[in-house]
Image: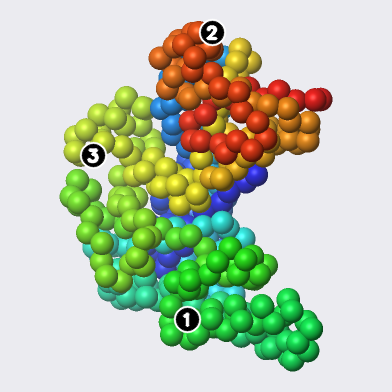
């Protein structure tokens, strides 16, 4: 199971600089529009102090944190939905990701050209959202037309249901609202899943600010969608931090008056945005963090390790990671009554440490 976050924004807002620092990859971050054409892809480890503490209890041969894939998608411009700036190609790349991180420029620098001629975060977000809405509207309207014609036959119940859902979504898009603003139940979302609507994807906003603004609280503007996570980052600072040792980087963060790097914050927020949770397996060969969506059952979690584990699932022995650390290992946790035996209906909890028993 692979989860991906698409990094989008206007040209020259700091996307590629941020991606380079995030993934420690060498990518072009030149000061001109469309220096990124094909998307850059990088896999990033999710920081998790719980795994660090578990590895002190279990000195495994290797420690494997969970990961998220970040995709640096070329800058969008006004008219992208109609093909401006190679927009159709770039929008297609966004459809393939699980969630979207919009990078918004909120710093002045005369040496870095803004594609719109001025730094205005609200206008930037409005432009990006409008292009996403227009791209979705064209797709929804086309599919709705097909569904409505098929729905004239009342016996075609699936198309009748689909047409009703698409009508609601089209109305919102025509009103320049994101599809995510429409109140859709699980069945309705499933009906339009294949359309991979851009504005239905989970979205977070990354404000790329100057160094002097890093330690100040971020205020939610009215033009940011309600409920969408917001974080503040200085891509320039993150680029500098990525070149330092862990000790030097921590010292720099302390001097700046912040507790963690913006990249760690972005990775954690992206993880939460995707509605994921982490469970652990520990042992002499490896201590490892695994990812499943919230609401997953124990057999589904076992299937993340190996598909045969899900098919032959018998039961799971589960210890909360904190209990395992406090008990100094499985034997202590068992003696303290902290080890639980869970069956096929068990819903996984964030921080579970598991041993799955199965028929191989």
**How crowded is the residue under tag 3: few (<14 C-alpha within 10 Å), some, or many (20+)?**
some
Indicate the position of residue 293 as horizontal and vertical percent values: 56, 45
**Residue 294 against residue 305 in the figure, above or below:** below
Q: Nearer the viewer, mark 2 or mark 1?
A: 2
In front here: 205 or 141? 141
Q: Contact (CB < 8 A) between labels 3 and 1?
A: no
At mark 3, the secondary structure is loop
Q: How far apart are marks 2 and 1 (CA)?
A: 57 Å
**Label 2 CA crowd tier, 10 Å (few <14, some 14–19, many 20+):** few
Mark nearer the N terminus (3 vs 1): 1
Q: Tag 2, which secondary structure?
A: helix
Density class for disc 1 (Cα within 10 Å; few <14, some 14-19, many ≥20) is: some
Q: How far apart are marks 3 and 1 (CA)?
A: 40 Å
Give the residue number, with chain letter if any, for mark 2.
331
Label 1 sits on residue: 172
Answer above or below: position of 283 versus 181: above
Asked where in the image residue 77 lies, by quadrant, the reply is bottom left
Q: In which quarter of the image is the N terminus?
A: top right
Q: Foreground: 68 or 324?
A: 324
- Name the residue carrying label 3: 258
Spatial CA distance of label 2 from label 3 is 39 Å
Marks 2 and 1: CB-CB under 8 Å?
no
Residue name at image x 57 percent, y 19 percent: 282
Query: Which of marks 3 and 2 precedes in the sequence?
Result: 3
Residue 260 in percent (x, y) is at 31, 37
In the picture as drawn, the residue positioned furthest to the right comes out as: 360
Quadrant (top left, top right, bottom left, bottom right) of the C terminus:
top right
Where residue 250 appears, as percent x and y from the top left, is: 29, 30
Give the number of callouts. Answer: 3
Residue in the image at 74% along x and 91% along y: 152
Nearer to me, 344 or 63 = 344
Residue ID at (73%, 27%)? 314
């Amino acid at each position: 199971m692979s989860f991906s976050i698409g990094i989008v924004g206007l040209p020259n807002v700091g996307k590629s600089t941020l991606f380079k620092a995030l993934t420690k990859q060498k990518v072009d971050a030149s000061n001109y529009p469309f220096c990124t054409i094909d998307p850059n892809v990088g896999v990033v480890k999710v920081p998790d102090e719980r795994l660090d503490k578990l590895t002190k209890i279990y000195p495994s041969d290797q420690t494997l944190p969970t990961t998220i894939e970040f995709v640096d998608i070329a800058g969008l411009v006004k008219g992208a939905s109609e093909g401006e700036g190679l927009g159709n190609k770039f929008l297609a790349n966004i459809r393939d990701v699980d969630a979207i991180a919009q990078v918004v420029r909120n710093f002045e620098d005369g040496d870095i050209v803004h594609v719109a001629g001025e730094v205005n975060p609200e206008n930037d977000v409005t432009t990006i959202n409008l292009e996403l809405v227009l791209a979705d509207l064209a797709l929804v309207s086309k599919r709705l037309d097909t569904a409505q014609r098929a729905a004239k036959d009342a016996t075609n119940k699936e198309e009748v249901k689909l047409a009703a859902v698409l009508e609601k979504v089209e109305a919102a898009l025509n009103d320049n609202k994101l599809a995510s603003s429409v109140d859709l139940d699980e069945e309705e979302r499933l009906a339009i899943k294949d359309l991979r609507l851009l504005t239905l994807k989970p979205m977070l906003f990354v404000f790329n600010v100057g160094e002097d603004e890093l330690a100040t609280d971020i205020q939610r503007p009215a033009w940011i969608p309600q409920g969408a996570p917001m974080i503040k980052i200085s891509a320039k600072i993150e680029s500098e931090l990525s070149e330092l040792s862990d000790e030097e980087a921590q010292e720099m963060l302390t001097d700046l008056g912040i507790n963690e790097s913006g990249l760690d914050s972005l990775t954690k927020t992206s993880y939460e945005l995707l509605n994921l949770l982490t469970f652990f397996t520990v042992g002499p060969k490896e201590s490892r963090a695994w990812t499943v969506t919230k609401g997953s059952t124990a057999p589904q979690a076992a299937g993340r390790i190996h598909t045969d584990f899900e098919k032959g699932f018998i039961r799971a022995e589960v210890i909360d990671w904190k209990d395992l650390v406090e008990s100094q290992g499985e034997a202590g946790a068992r003696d303290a009554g902290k080890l639980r035996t869970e069956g096929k209906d068990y819903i996984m909890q964030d921080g579970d440490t598991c041993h799955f028993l199965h028929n191989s």
